[in-house]
Amino acid sequence: MLKGFSVPLTPQGKSALATLPPWHYSSDCIAIEYWTDPAAIAALLPPGLTPDRKSGGRAFFWFLDWQFTGSNDELTDPARYQYREAFVLVEADFDGMAVNYCPFIFVDNDAALARGWAQGFPKKLGSIYQTRSFSAPSPAAAPLAKGSRFGASVAAHGERLATARIQLEEKVANPATVFNRPTTMRRYFPQLTAGHHEKPAVDELTLSVTDDLAIVDVWTGSAELRITEVPGEDMHFIAPLRIGRGYRLGMAYSVTDLRILRTGAG
Amino acid sequence: MLKGFSVPLTPQGKSALATLPPWHYSSDCIAIEYWTDPAAIAALLPPGLTPDRKSGGRAFFWFLDWQFTGSNDELTDPARYQYREAFVLVEADFDGMAVNYCPFIFVDNDAALARGWAQGFPKKLGSIYQTRSFSAPSPAAAPLAKGSRFGASVAAHGERLATARIQLEEKVANPATVFNRPTTMRRYFPQLTAGHHEKPAVDELTLSVTDDLAIVDVWTGSAELRITEVPGEDMHFIAPLRIGRGYRLGMAYSVTDLRILRTGAG
Amino acid sequence: MLKGFSVPLTPQGKSALATLPPWHYSSDCIAIEYWTDPAAIAALLPPGLTPDRKSGGRAFFWFLDWQFTGSNDELTDPARYQYREAFVLVEADFDGMAVNYCPFIFVDNDAALARGWAQGFPKKLGSIYQTRSFSAPSPAAAPLAKGSRFGASVAAHGERLATARIQLEEKVANPATVFNRPTTMRRYFPQLTAGHHEKPAVDELTLSVTDDLAIVDVWTGSAELRITEVPGEDMHFIAPLRIGRGYRLGMAYSVTDLRILRTGAG
Amino acid sequence: MLKGFSVPLTPQGKSALATLPPWHYSSDCIAIEYWTDPAAIAALLPPGLTPDRKSGGRAFFWFLDWQFTGSNDELTDPARYQYREAFVLVEADFDGMAVNYCPFIFVDNDAALARGWAQGFPKKLGSIYQTRSFSAPSPAAAPLAKGSRFGASVAAHGERLATARIQLEEKVANPATVFNRPTTMRRYFPQLTAGHHEKPAVDELTLSVTDDLAIVDVWTGSAELRITEVPGEDMHFIAPLRIGRGYRLGMAYSVTDLRILRTGAG
């Protein structure tokens, strides 16, 4: 009788931060390949994941401008549903499968935070920006063309956490060779009852399930990335030691499911 | 080895939105007593709570400027830990005990959102403001004195959800007669795995446990309150039919525990 | 020796909100044609402008996602220079020339506010959003195609000021027939010295000068527009009585000059 | 017929960012005394001011939580009129008079920005926070008492510009010995017409005139202050070389006038 996928539940179901799936997404993305200390990655992995020895500390830092819609034309209410995101994916191994794992992620929207927590993304609030590509020609347009420069940044509580820049060189013929690992997360919900503060009510290793994945207009080029040490954040422990290629692309998918790889912290 | 009360968990434990209790709070509050349709309250109550027949639809709308600190001097990092909140408490009955229940709540800070979800407060993001009382005398000071006027408001996604005004008349000698019900919440965390979208992983009726509660400097007076209908929100279903007294007070407490009144939605 | 087009001036010139022109802009735009009370438009016109009798109260409400760059690669610092804007243009007459005049405008960025004030745009802060068109196909993508729906809104201080929706029907072959009036503004800077509060230091009727104007990818379709009455705003006096066509387009131009049509309020 | 002290002007006068004086203010303040390079101060001074040889590079960094009201009960609309501010005052000499000068200032509210520009304060937008003193006793309360610690910070565009902390030691018997210099500003409004970009329409050295100044509850103690170098800001050129005392106080005044000390840059 009370409706909503997430809180708050109401008889009408309009207040819920997250409504029932399907959830549809389309985005513009900037992604920076980099390598960090493999031991720092290993120290962040949840039970069930082990370091990917072959990846040598490889990670990707992503910035995304997202448009979301559910079943109620949410894309026409951008004040409530459009959002921006930044996250890191580190490479790991699950039972012989090469995967990504998301230890840090920031969004600027509460509906995105609620959906993300349900999936296992450890979302916090941040201010995220990326240079956009506009169609009207101008020195301000940043077209998808050789030489165009894009910047991106994420901040939280007035502290800059990461800053990136890329310069486009060429289109990527086969993006599947670059973005080819599924993403794993840790779904985690604590208990506050005295004596149980360190025994979560929910603790699951999860695998993102995406329908109708589309990756389009992928360009690559040179890249810069800084991850800064600030009070109250541990992301700098996986700051770049070496930086690889930068990418600018469009990505879309839908979500209706989540695969649970492992339950419990034991 | 990975630390944090909430996500994100890290070896160092600094990134976690919520650190392990105790959590200490002090606030300035504006609260408006009002009566709404008892049927609208009944329709919002979770399993385990029943309408309080004697209250006749009574509710309180609260606005709070909060200062938080944990065990690491968090109060000296106000950009990260100071926050504002607005919520409704409706009167209900739990097994013969007169209680409040919180169906709607808004905060402007992600750490507060994460702690709140762990307690069962269905927090969403909002922009909340209240007139403050300053010590330097001026027409702008709003002293705690007969005749002073205070305003308060909450908005989300650029839509005004509620607006209140009060005018102080007199100090309240015995605030315990006004604020005397414990608060109950619904701790709720969904599942995204296909086929389980409406079977939450966690669904508990909880009771807020507060240590060292202090209520100080309580003034009362006349009050106005509007709760507006806006797209994407159901709070207007408990809009005021009649408005009672307004209050302006200071409140502090600490949190280290949560009482589970009932588990499961059955 | 102290540098900057606007305050704050410094020896290095980096702190200035606005640097010396040229200023380059590219944008995605949603524009709604509508008609309001001609008397309400007349009441808003500054000295030097008269009502355009033939326009019958015609106005356009615009929402714009802007990318700005100056001479220092500002487009790669989107956290500082990317911004959103909403404004009204009402039709008027200057000395026999058909013009637009801008009585209300909102932006979410202080550099844009400073540049705008220098031109005569009466900018205030607001939160502005519009549905974007993404290239990765999805129900969330809003492609530039027949049937796509776009929403847009502007809010200030947590009050929704205007909300629009359009649905694309067809491409516009010749946009010059639609967007063909130059824009006039009132450049105005007051005096605070006692006795001079109503005698501005600067009061000029200005005409926007744009170089390299490009208008691209213009689509038109059906439209909805609401302008809401809220405390502290007078924009609802020019709310729509009748709504015309909606437009979605890209626009770019550069600014290096401003034409002064008339000086002084006399 | 069109009303408003600042833009936008309307027949009703409600839209104007700044209404006609009087403007009334009350605040809680944290101020940090410090010394920087006297040459860096000298380089920032506008025509008419000269370095104060006796001050040896002394400056104060202020953080203020402000409540504003005009003639329309604005203090009961805190979403629109309450704001926060951070600024630096450097010591200088005007024609033999010991003065302060304000080279950098940040606010989080557009009405405050508009009033400030009219006075000569070179306001930009920022996010400003300070620890507050609450009356309800708690480890989170920060009472005005020996040992209490307060933090404060200012950020803009997601970059932290300055961070301060103070620890209270004792009440100040005679604050007039500390805060005893009038404040000067540079009122500056540029021209955009080609050929005149560096010839401002308004360029005045001004002196703040405050009525009914009240300074109350002044405490002093030890202090920390960092001013950080970030892209797009020059404030770090007056970063502290040595830090003096910290202060926490209440301050109120009204504004109805401005004194022009000198006109033109010549």
Image: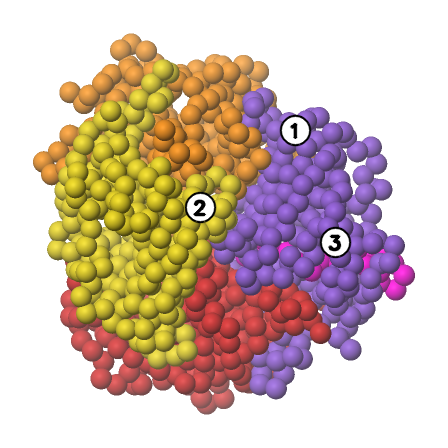
Chain colours: A orange, B yellow, C purple, D red
Q: Name the residue that disc number 2 marks.
A: B236
Magenta-tinted stretch: C91-114
Name which residue lies at 23% across and 26% down.
B264
In the rendering, at what x and y percent does residue C98 appear? 85, 56
The residue furthest left is: A195
Disc 2 to disc 3, C-alpha distance: 31 Å
- Could you give the CA–CA distance between mark 1 and mark 2, rounded to whole angstroms? 31 Å
Disc 3 on helix, strand or loop? Answer: loop
* Mark with earlier residue (3, 1): 3
Q: Residues within 10 Å of mark 2 (few under 14, many from 20)?
A: some
Crowd around label 3: few <14 · some 14–19 · many ≥20 (10 Å): many
Which amino acid does the dot numbered 2 rest on?
His
Is the same chain shared between marks 3 and 1?
Answer: yes
- What is the three-letter code of the residue carrying label 1? Ser
Nearest-to-viewer mark from 3 and 1: 3
Q: Name the quadrant containing residue C246.
A: top right
Q: Residue furthest bottom?
A: D96
Q: Which mark is residue C148?
A: 1
Does the stretch in magenta take in B137? no
Image: D240 above or below C236:
below
